[in-house]
Amino acid sequence: MVVGRLALALVFAGTASTAWGEIAQPKVFDIKNYGAIGDGVAMDTTAVQQAIDACHQAGGGIVRVPPGDFQIGTIWLKSNVTLSLDQGACLLGSRDIADYPVKGLDDPREGGPHCLIYAKDATNITIEGLGVIDGRGTPEFFPRIRTQGRETSIRPRLLRMVNCENLTFSGVTYRRPAFWGLHLIDCKDIHFNAVTVRFRNNNYNNDGMDLDGCENVLIENCDIDSGDDAICLKSSLNPCRNIVVRNCRVSSNTAAFKCGTSSRGGFLDVTVRNCYFYNCPMGAIKLQVVDGGRMENIDISRIVMEDVGSPLFIRLGDRGRTFTRKTSESRGRDVEPEDVPVGTLQRVRVSHVVAKVTLEDFAETSRAAYRNLTPREPEWWAERQRAQAGPIMITGIPGHCVEDVELKDIMISFPGGGTTDDARREVPEDIARYPEQFFFGVLPAWGAYLRHARNIVFENVELSTRKPDARQRIVLDDVVGFQERGRK
């Protein structure tokens, strides 16, 4: 993997016989020298962009953001530029959509082009430091507007980079995007280290990291609290390949770690190791292939989950989206597949997991003020929460099986409380529907529900309930080659 940079080690290795003053220091371009004010009121977009342009034209260096509140609209990062934020420095996103021009920006395969920070076809970009990048994308200024089931509002992403290489994100805190947070498309050689994300309960669709068609990625030591999917791999055209996530604390209103929903290019060689997933009421880990593509060689281990919904959702479906045209969201029942053949999902290993599945409290859910939940809704919400706090679910569709999945050394505690009516439920296939586990409703198993699957192994998998449950521990439907060994 080409992500662990050794530049600092090489510098110090050469100091034994070299005077400190002889070491070439990067040029520093302070944004205040280009007219930035930093009072949180003045628009500093031009000053920041001029500093970036000067740094790039000089062959590279550091664009320094000193302490202060610098209000900006869209800025373009360029090759060989390090954007370095001091402690106390904050880049504040403008609250006026007019400050997010799209001239010259590409039109992404998902969503609109607007963003606060943009880069395309660039190399060697770093965003580092102890400061903050705050999109201020609250519903008051960037409301979600839907017309006939489609979004018609304009909500900028916090960051979008396209076809870039050698990207480093270190130390900075990211806050409050109006839409997705950190979106990288078709990028290579990426390192996230000690990044903090604080998006929760801010606006709709506040994903943490969306990596679409990216290769050679290391995400480590990060602290992520997102509104929507926290670490989300997508493949709307090209595969996500050679991805490592390790030593991260992750919380989300939806999923801590997710592959999909976009899966046309596939997901190959993904490792998630030694992470803490907490307060994820809609589920912790979701592995989904619904738009064609291949998912292979996924290794997830040493995970502690606390207060999560369904701990593991593996779904091979047939939405069949091409991402070459605008289509429906496919969230309703009995929707039809689109244009892409069914993909494959195989060789997944999940091991050394300890998890506690819980029902989300309505009061906690209501903290997301943008959802506009009212006290009259708890009964409806309670049924949804029961579906969210479901069992392990591994399911393909008729004629297309999930294959070769191993679960080993796992302990999961479920809330229990399932009824005899729940145990008799027939589960819809919904082959083309948007893949969210709770859309299937309360399942007839409390521990694991497997359907249209082959060669699934449970070894030393301990499943328990905290209350009595009338459902079966494990339900198998069209499953060939299921093995269970060790404790139960």
Image (cartoon, helix red, strand yellow):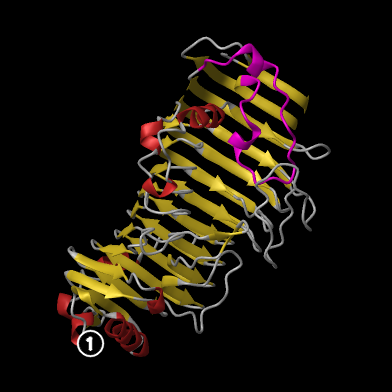
Residue at the farthest front position: 376
Residue 178, percent from left and from top: 41, 61
Judged left or right of residue 92, residue 273 is right
Q: Furthest residue to the right?
A: 399
Q: Quadrant of residue 98?
A: bottom left
Q: Could you tell me which residue is drawn at 41 percent across and 54 percent down? A: 203
Position of 397 relative to 106 (above/below): above
Q: Does the magenta segment cover residue 459?
A: no
Choose top left, top right, bottom left or bottom right for residue 175.
bottom left
Q: Assign the magenta stretch its main secondary structure.
A: loop
Front-lying residue, 101 or 355: 101
Q: Is residue 266 visible?
A: yes
Relative side of 209 to 441, left or right: left
| Residue in the image at 25% along x and 82% along y | 27
Query: Over which residues does the magenta segment extend?
Result: 416-445
Q: Secondary structure at mark 1?
A: helix
Front position in the image: 339 or 5: 339
- Residue 288 position, x and y percent, is 64, 45
> Does 80 sit left or right of 257 as displayed?
left
Give the image location of residue 106, x and y in percent: 55, 77
Q: Is residue 403 above or below residue 63?
A: above
Position of residue 157 in the picture relative to residue 480 (left or right):
left
Residue 304 percent across, percent down from the top left = 42, 31
Residue linked to disc 1: 34
Residue type at tag 1: Tyr
